Image (cartoon, rainbow, N blue to C red):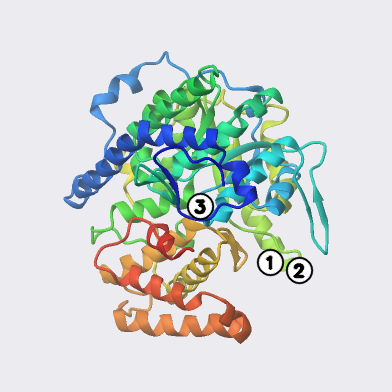
Amino acid sequence: MPSIPDGVEILVPITTEGEQVLTPDALRFLATLQREFGNARRALLHKRVERQAQLDAGQDPNFLPKTAHIRADPNWRVAPIPADLQRRHIEITGPTDKKMLINALNSGADMFMADFEDANAPTWNNMLQGQRNVTEAIERTIYLKTPEKEYKLNDKVATLMVRPRGWHLQEKHLRVDGTPISGSLFDFGLYFFHNARRLLSKGTGPYFYLPKLESHLEARLWNDVFLFSQGYLGLPKGTVKVTVLIETILAAFEMEEILYELRDHIAGLNAGRWDYIFSCIKKFRNRENVLFPDRAQVTMTVPFMRAYTELLVRTCHKRGAHAMGGMAAFIPSRKDEQVNANALAKVREDKLRESSDGFDGTWIAHPDLVPPVRQVFDAALGEKPHQKERMREDVNVAASQLIDFRVPNGTITEGGLRNNVSVAIQYTEAWLRGSGAVAINNLMEDAATAEIARAQVWQWLHHHGTLNDGRAITPDLYRAILDEEIEKIKQNWGAENVARSRLGEAAVLFDQLVTADQLADFLTLPAYEHLE
C-alpha cells in the first residue's frame, strides 16, 4: 500500500500495478490540484445551472457583449504551435486499452487521442490501467500477446494526445478532504505528473483534448490549472498544448473567447458534432417548439450545423489555430462488401465537405479509414500541413443561425424511435460492463451518440412528437416499442450472452431517464452510480 498523503482517501484496494500510478508524489499533486481548483470548478458547474434556468425562461444565447473587445481586436493570435502538432490531417480516437492504443498509434494517422472520456467507461481499473498504458506507449514498452496475435509498436507512430473527463464528472474512488476529486483533475493530473518530462525529453509534449466546455470561464479555469501545474513541475509556460472540443451550443457563442483565455496553451478547436447535437437538444429541452427529427437526418449539411462548423473554421484561422473536423462514426466492414462500400462513400463525402470548407484535419474511429481519408486531405492540401491561410472571410454567422434548429424535410419515424431505444440500451449495457466505445449497426457508438438517442426519446415523449405516419408518440407506444426492442436484443444475443449481461439494469436505467419529468444532464452521471 502506498503512503497516502493527509486528507486523501482511496476507497478501493490498490493493486501493485495501481501503486505505480498512485505514487505518494502523484497523490500529493492530485490533492493539491483539487484543493486549489475544486471550489472554482463547483462554482462554474453552478453557473451552468443558472444558465439553464435562463434558457428555460426563454432567454436565447447570444455573443457576449462584455467580451466584444476580444472579438473586435484584430491583433492577438494563439502562441506558436509545436512542430508535431502542425500536420493533423487525420486524428484517430478511442479508449486506452492496450490493443486500441497499439493499433491506433500504428494506424498511419497523424494523431491518436487516447480517450478517458466518452469512449471510455470510467471503472477504477480502466482509469488506472489506462494511465499505465499511455506511459508504456510513451516509453515504447507497451506490448500485448493474445492467442490470435502479438501487438507492439511500429517504428513510426502517431503523436499522442489525451482527453481527460469533463468538468461535470467526478472520480468517486478517490477523495480529498472528504470530497470526490474532479475526474478532470484526476485524469489530467496523473498523465501530466508522470509524463510531461518524459514527453519533452522525446521531442514532443503533454498534449490534451478538452471536452464539454460551456464557456470561456471554464476555459480560463483550465488555463489556471495549466499555469499552476507547469509551475509545480518547474516547466515553462506554454508547455501544455490543448485542443478544445466545441461540442456544446453555448461554447459555440464563445469560440474566440475560449481561444483567447487559452492563447498560451491552445492549438485549435474541434467540431465535436455528436455532443453538439446532444447539447442543442439538452439546452433547449423545455421548449416545445424545438423538436428534432431522427438523428440520422440531423446531418452536417443542415443549416444550423453548417453555421456552427463554418464559424469554427473562420474563428480558428483568424487567430492562427487549427480547425479540426468531427468524428466519422461510420465503421467499415471486413465481412460485408456492400456495407463497407456504403460506409466508405459516406465518410468520403463527409471529409470532402470538411476539407473544402477549410478544416485542417479530421477525426476517424477506425484504422481502416486512414487510407481513404488520407486520400481526401492529401488531394485538398497536398504537402501543406494545414490550410490556415484560408481565412473564410466570406463567413458571417448571426446568433440566430446557430439556434435555428429547423431541419428541412425532417421527420420522426418509427424506425428512428426504435433505433434510439435499441442503441441507447445496448450502449448503456456495454458501458456498465466497462466498454465505452461500441460498434452497433456499423456505427461506432460512444457516450455522445447514446446521449442523443436517449435525449430524443425523452424530447419526443414530453413534447408530444408525432411520427411521419401520423401516430402520436405516447407513453403506450413507447412502452410497446421498448418491450419489442428488448426482446429483439435478447434474440440477437442469445440466452447465454443475455444471462452474462447487464441488459436488465440498462433497460431500467434507460426507461427511468426517458420518462423522468426532467431531462438528466448526462446519462453517465446516474450510470456511474451503477458502475462497480
- Give residue 57's position: percent from left, percent from top: 16, 50
In three-dimensional space, the C-alpha distance between marks 2 and 1, rounded to whole angstroms, equals 9 Å
Foreground tag (2 vs 1) = 2
- In the image, residue 129 above or below residue 492: above
Residue behind mark 2? 335
Give whichever of 110, 437 is nearer the camera: 437
- Give residue 33's position: percent from left, percent from top: 42, 33
Residue sitting at x 47%, y 45%: 165
Q: Secondary structure at mark 3?
A: loop
Give whichever of 351, 258 is nearer the camera: 258
Residue sitting at x 35%, y 46%: 179
In three-dimensional space, the C-alpha distance between marks 2 and 3, rounded to whole angstroms, equals 27 Å
Mark 3 nearby-residue class (10 Å; few <14, some 14–19, many ≥20): many
- In the image, residue 154 above or below residue 368: above
Give whichever of 354, 502 is nearer the camera: 502
Q: Secondary structure at mark 2?
A: loop
Looking at numbered disc 1 in the image, what kind of residue is underneath it?
A: Val
Residue 160, picture quadrant: top right
Among numbered discs 2 and 3, the one appearing first in the sequence: 3
Residue sitting at x 22%, y 48%: 55
Foreground tag (2 vs 3) = 3
Among numbered discs 1 and 3, the one appearing first in the sequence: 3
Mark 2 nearby-residue class (10 Å; few <14, some 14–19, many ≥20): few
Residue behind mark 1? 339
Looking at numbered disc 2 in the image, what kind of residue is underneath it?
A: Lys
Left or right, 174 with reference to 367: left
Residue at the extreme left of the image, as rendered: 57
Residue sitting at x 70%, y 36%: 138
Answer whether labels 2 and 1 touch (C-beta < 8 Å). Answer: yes
Residue behind mark 3? 118
Q: Secondary structure at mark 1?
A: helix
Mark 1 nearby-residue class (10 Å; few <14, some 14–19, many ≥20): some
